[in-house]
Image (cartoon, helix red, strand yellow):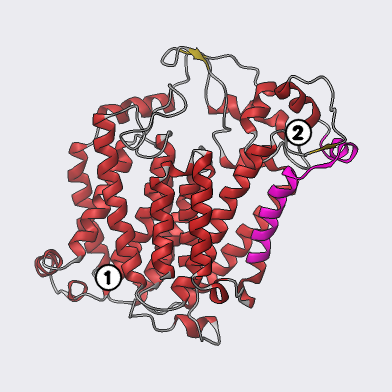
Amino acid sequence: MQRTLLFLLVAGSYLLVAGGPPWTIGPLLGLAALGVLAAPVRTLAFPRSLRALDAALLLVLGAVLLQAVPLPADLAATLSPAAGRVRASLTFATTEASPWTTLSVDPRATLLSAATVALGILAFWIARAAFGAGGNTRSFCRGLALFGAAVAVAAIVQKAATPKLLLFVLPPDSRSANPFGAFTNRNHFAAWLLLVIAPSCGYMIARLRTHPTFRARSWREAFGRFMNSGIVITAAALLTMLLVLLATLSRSAVLGLGAAAICGWALGRPRMAIERTNLPAILGMTGVALLGAMAFIDLDGWAVRLQQSLNADPAGFSRITIWRESVPIIRDFWLTGSGAGTYSDAMTQYQQTRVWVGSMQRWAHFNNAHSGYLQLASEGGLLLVLPVVTALACLYALARRTVSADKGEMFWVRVGAAAGLAGIATQSVWEVPLVMPANAVLCGVLAGLLVFRREGSRSAPDSYRRQDED
């Protein structure tokens, strides 16, 4: 039951317009709460080996909520002297009239960001509990791959038939938006695909290793067994998602995909080195199929995108411009940040460059930092950066232990989950995909796949020793 609710949370977070409109947050939090209540003792058990990570995640959520909590105006002004000026400009006020105020320049936006953080954390706890309870984890991975492929096909059709609508029917808030699927930003949609592709690829490798295809003595025999098996459906789903990801023309997502591939290869290489395997040959066949499918990709569009990457904009506008103008925000809000979700508000006061965008017939406003790390520093300051870094360090340490301890075929699913997280971390250098609830939920699911442990095990190595049933 809990695994079904987790899948519904993943699907619902996408189908509810990726969680972008504020009205979607309530239903998503309700669905996450049902996932917790399906097995409350197991979900909220907080195993000793994971308590450091859980504590760090709660500190992250607490830091975001603290930014939105009313404090005495004098204390808030001491902690964040620049906040009053930005808040006054947003509300057209000349002074702080109330004796109580918040660290965030827009507490409502910060509360919405807190809800996104909560969704990611709850998805992680639910996934960790659901996969740790045993059962058929592979059905979840297979369902995720098929759902991702269906979403990818629908997104391509939607882009061709109704290019300015979300999910065929909903107009985005901004007329200048370039929607793709349920996302107003194609880079965010490409990030969603990346987060689905990575664990699905890990599942396919695990499935291949337990299938006679893996033990074939020749390419011809392996190909015949592969085509006659159910694995071909998962492979087709993966290929579909890869092609649609390329069709988004998202350079950051392709770089993230490359980082995910390198991470997966590095983690899987020791296992392949000690086992006699046809895996490199099988992956080579997949690569050949992908190269053949490139004939259906918009190569002209990619050529333009690459040229834009190499050449400076005639108006002098680039991500470097945005990054440079984010530095003063970080300097003025170094301790407590401007408030999660308030980068766009703060930039109304800090943006210096004026760029006329002909396609939008308007002056450009820098509504995000085009770097998840810079935006985190701007909106969160040390108050948020420190617990986030602590949580990432704890997750990295746990990931190393769980991947090395897993001796079953679920090892490859864990590798896929780790690769997906590495890919999204790389893409976040240039984009802010995790501001979207749909992507935050998927990150939580991948983290759960990466570090879950079997119930009843006395030690982590014992819990991962034999998982062929998955």
What is the x, y in percent for residue 21? Answer: 49, 38
What is the x, y in percent for residue 288? Answer: 20, 51
**Number of other residues with Cα within 10 Å of mark 2, as a class: few under 14, some 14 to 19, many 20 or more:** few
Q: Secondary structure at mark 2?
A: helix
Would residue 453 appear left or right of 282 to someone viewing this image? Answer: right
Which residue is more in the foreground, 322 or 113? 113
How many numbered marks, from 0 up? 2
Residue on which disc 1 sits: 207
Q: Are marks 1 and 2 in contact (CB under 8 Å)?
A: no
Magenta stretch, residue numbers:
54-80
Which label is found at residue 83? Answer: none
Q: Secondary structure at mark 1?
A: helix
* Residue 253 visible, this angle: no
Residue at 41% in and 68% down = 3
* Image-quadrant location for residue 269: bottom left
Magenta segment, prevailing SS (helix, strand or loop): helix
Quadrant the C terminus occupies: bottom left
Which label is found at residue 331? Answer: 2
The type of residue carrying mark 1 is: Arg
Q: Measure the C-alpha gap from mark 1 to mark 2.
A: 50 Å
Quadrant the N terminus occupies: bottom left
Residue at 40% in and 47% down = 14
Would residue 451 appear left or right of 392 to someone viewing this image? Answer: left
What is the x, y in percent for residue 390? Answer: 67, 58
Which residue is more in the foreground, 211 or 440? 440
The correct choice, above or below, for 234 with respect to 171 in the image is: below
The type of residue carrying mark 2 is: Arg
The correct choice, above or below, for 223 with respect to 150 in the image is: below
